[in-house]
Structure formats: C-alpha cells, structure tokens
Image (cartoon, helix red, strand yellow):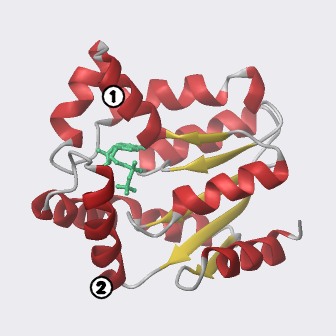
Amino acid sequence: MFILILGAPGSGKGTQGKLLAERLGLPKITTGDLLRAAMKDGTPLGLEAKKFYDDGKLVPDAIILGMIKAELDRPEATEGAILDGFPRTAAQAELVDKTLAKRGQRLNHILLLDVTEDELVRRMSRRAQVEGRADATPEAIKTRLQVYQRDTAPLIAHYAQRGNVRHVPGTGSVDQISEEIKRIIGR
Ligand code: ADP
C-alpha cells in the first residue's frame, strides 16, 4: 500500500508519517531527511542541494527525480511505502505515478493535513529553535510557505481529479490526528 501525506511545511507530515509507517510496517521515504543526510555527509548531491535548501527553495527536479526513482525502486518499497515530502512538483508527481503504474500499483491513499497559515508559522518558528535547521530563518520559513502554495498546492487538484484525496484536520493532539488517519484508511 502506498500512502502519500501532503501538507504545507509544519503541517505534521513527518510526525504522522512516522506513526503510520510504524503501525503499518511500511518504510517511510522522506526526501527532506535524505537531503539533510546528503548535506551532512557533504556528498556532491548534498552540496548542490544546500544552495537551495538553506533559502527554503525547492531543490531542482534535476537533482530530486533520480533520488525519488532510486528510493521507490528499493526492495523495501516494492510492496508499499509512506511518501513524506514528495512529490512536491508536477514533474515529481508524474514520476511517482508512472513508476507505480508500471508496477501495476498506485497511490492508494492521499492524505492532506490541513493547518492554518498562522499555525504553520508558529510551529515552524518554535521548531526552528529546537532543531536549528538552516532553513528556519524567518526569511526561509516565508519562502517555504510561498513555494508550497505555488508549486505543491496545485498537486492537490491533480490528485483530487482522481477522487482519492482525503482532508485531515491537522490541528489537535498527535493522537487525535493519528486516530482520524486510522479511521480514513481503515487500518
Ligand atoms: P518542510 O516540509 O518542513 O519544509 P522538508 O524536510 O520536507 O521540510 O523539506 C525541507 C527542504 O528540503 C525544502 O525546503 C526543500 O529545499 C528540500 N526538499 C525536500 N523534499 C523535496 C522535494 N521533493 N523536492 C524538492 N526539494 C525538496
């Protein structure tokens, strides 16, 4: 089973994705974590990504598409995965759709975590102090929210056309949200 968790930065995708992955025994693929690991290791990909990442901009598809393909093709992900942080652009969505379709698979559930913009900014700023992420300056936070609206939010309409997007209220306790997700996907 493939489950996509969509939502703005700060909406709780990582937290809910982790719980869901543990509950269902599926791997979670998180492009943000993969990029942070590459930057920490100082790989060529990491160094290139850092130029965009630190400003809160999307890392170009030329870099990300290969990473997504490789992750989906890993043996652990042949039966399913939780997708967190991608697809974020039309090209990434197309790659995911095509890769799964070739294998006779599809995104079984698309969950959209709904959180108001005020709450997103509050959460990202609070988290910034704890995590010390390079993309957590006020400017980078603003850019990340703008980029989400411009490049990623249109994917909601793309998937809504197929009728399998479910809105999940993203405010409430972690447990409440997780229960709601459980109810929606039925397990
Ligand atoms: P958040 O959703 O809170 O912004 P992420 O860890 O998902 O956190 O993403 C952080 C940054 O990593 C993004 O601003 C972007 O620079 C980069 N990134 C992560 N995933 C992708 C992706 N699929 N495509 C392009 N850039 C990405």
Considering every residue shown, the one lying at the far top of the view is 44
Q: Position of residue 148 (x, y in %)?
A: 33, 63
Q: In the picture, which quadrant includes the C terminus?
A: bottom right
Q: Callout 1: few (<14), some (14-19), or many (20+) C-alpha neighbours within 10 Å?
A: few
In the image, is residue 185 above or below residue 52? below
Q: Position of residue 126 (x, y in %)?
A: 30, 69
Give left or right: position of 182 versus 165.
right
- Residue 64 seen in render: no
The residue to which callout 1 is attached is 62
Give left or right: position of 43 versus 102.
left
In the image, is residue 94 above or below residue 144? above
Q: Position of residue 98 (x, y in %)?
A: 63, 38
Q: To which quarter of the image does residue 154 belong?
A: bottom left
Of 78 and 118, the residue lying toward us:
118
Give the CA separation, mark 1 to mark 2. Answer: 32 Å
- Residue 151 seen in render: yes
Q: Residue at x 82, y 69 (%)?
A: 185
Considering every residue shown, the one lying at the far left of the view is 139
Of 1 and 101, the residue lying toward us:
1
Q: Residue at x 40, y 66 (%)?
A: 10
Q: Secondary structure at mark 1?
A: helix
Give left or right: position of 127 versus 84.
left
Q: Residue at x 35, y 82 (%)?
A: 119
In the image, is residue 24 above or below residue 102? below
| Three-letter code for the amino acid on which mark 1 is drawn | Ala
| Three-letter code for the amino acid on which mark 2 is drawn | Asp
Mark 1 vs mark 2, foreground winner is: 2
Q: Secondary structure at mark 2?
A: helix
